[in-house]
């Protein structure tokens, strides 16, 4: 038998199961041998070569990355994959368990929150995924929508940024301002157009909207019309803090209005009215 031809559903399920077994070890920071996993898969999938298996594992990383979920850094995402592989990833029971565990991590138990800030990613002049794969994934899964529905993940990201804002002010000698920072989305509700009312060390207002995902820095996120309006009306003070890689090691970057200078804004909802 050769290693050519489309993979069957059974083959996809087998390699996806092996990938998630490795991902569990990777997230737990336990040593594991990728070569040994590959050799075992060669026995279970005699029609597939070592190289074909390696490529397929990289395909799984690409799918998980685009779903804003954890993937194995040792398998660099390879974006040219079968559509049926998307279904195999989505239906595997360990994926949901890993995601649920990731958003429930108690990351804010530390006294001084640690948040690694980096420059925002530069715009790309092309899509990360080929159009065929991008459309196939969009039909099956919306990572931004999944994260938007997960209030626990959003709340945890806001709490992390809240603590970090207070920490930065205290480190600047402004404990007086740190004590006045408010978690507006929790204290007043979601209608303000920002989540945290903070300050610069000089005492100027700083209105912080937090968007959190477990995916990479280019994962899509949802933003409401109200948030965009508040951002445009308060360009000097409004900032979007984008938290990513939340489950492993939270990292963040900051965007200032106008947001369409940094990201491509796509309408996703429409108001239907009579007359």
Image: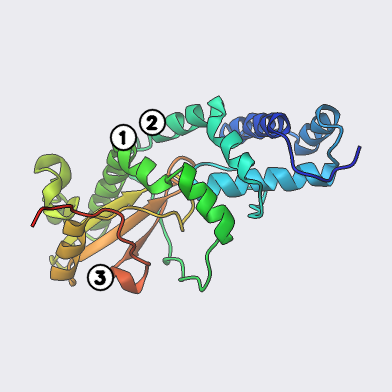
Residue depicted at 42% across the width and 46% down the height: 142
Residue depicted at 40% across the width and 32% down the height: 105
Label 2 or label 3, whichever lies nearer to me, is 3
Quadrant of the drawing holding the N terminus: top right
Q: Is residue 183 visible?
A: no
Residue depicted at 53% across the width and 35% down the height: 90
Asked whether 252 or 265 is in front, the reply is 265
Residue bearing the label numbered 3: 257
Q: Which label's residue is closer to the chain start, 2 or 1?
A: 2
Residue 23 in the image, given as x and y percentages of width and height: 61, 35
Residue 98 in the image, given as x and y percentages of width and height: 50, 31
Q: Dot 1 surroundings within 10 Å: few (below 14), some, or many (20 or more)?
A: some
Residue 29 in the image, given as x and y percentages of width and height: 60, 34
Asked whether 14 or 171 is in front, the reply is 14
Judged from this view, the residue extending furthest toward the right is 1
Image quadrant where residue 241 sits: bottom left
Residue 10 in the image, given as x and y percentages of width and height: 71, 29
Tag on residue 152?
1
Q: Which label's residue is closer to the chain start, 1 or 3?
A: 1
Circles 2 and 1, Cβ within 8 Å, touching? The answer is yes
Circles 1 and 3, Cβ within 8 Å, touching? The answer is no
Circles 2 and 3, Cβ within 8 Å, touching? The answer is no
Judged from this view, the residue extending furthest toward the front is 275
Q: Dot 3 surroundings within 10 Å: few (below 14), some, or many (20 or more)?
A: some
Residue bearing the label numbered 2: 104
Asked whether 237 or 220 is in front, the reply is 220
Q: Which label's residue is closer to the chain start, 2 or 3?
A: 2
Residue depicted at 49% across the width and 52% down the height: 216
């Amino acid at each position: 038998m050769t290693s050519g031809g489309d993979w069957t559903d059974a083959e996809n399920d087998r390699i996806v199961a092996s990938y998630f077994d490795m991902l569990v070890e990777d997230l737990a920071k336990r040593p594991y041998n990728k070569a040994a996993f590959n050799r075992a898969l060669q026995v279970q999938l005699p029609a597939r070569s070592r190289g074909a298996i390696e490529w397929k594992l990289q395909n799984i990383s690409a799918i998980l990355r685009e779903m804003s979920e954890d993937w194995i850094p040792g398998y660099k995402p390879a974006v040219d994959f079968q559509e049926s592989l998307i279904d195999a990833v989505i239906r595997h029971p360990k994926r949901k368990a890993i995601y649920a565990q990731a958003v429930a991590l108690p990351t804010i138990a530390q006294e001084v929150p640690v948040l690694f800030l980096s420059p925002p990613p530069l715009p790309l002049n092309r899509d990360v995924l080929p159009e065929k794969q991008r459309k196939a994934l969009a039909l099956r899964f919306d990572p931004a929508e999944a994260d938007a529905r997960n209030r626990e993940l959003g709340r945890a990201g806001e709490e992390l940024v809240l603590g970090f804002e207070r920490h930065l002010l205290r480190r600047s000698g402004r404990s007086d301002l740190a004590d006045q920072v408010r978690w507006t989305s929790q204290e007043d509700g979601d209608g303000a157009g920002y989540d945290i009312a903070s300050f610069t060390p000089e005492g100027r207002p700083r209105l912080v909207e937090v968007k959190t995902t477990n995916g990479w820095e280019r994962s899509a996120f949802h933003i409401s019309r109200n948030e965009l309006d508040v951002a445009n009306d308060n360009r000097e003070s409004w900032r979007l803090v984008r938290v990513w890689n939340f489950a492993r090691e939270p990292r963040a970057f900051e965007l200032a209005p106008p947001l369409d200078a940094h990201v491509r804004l796509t309408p996703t909802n429409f108001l239907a009215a009579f007359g």
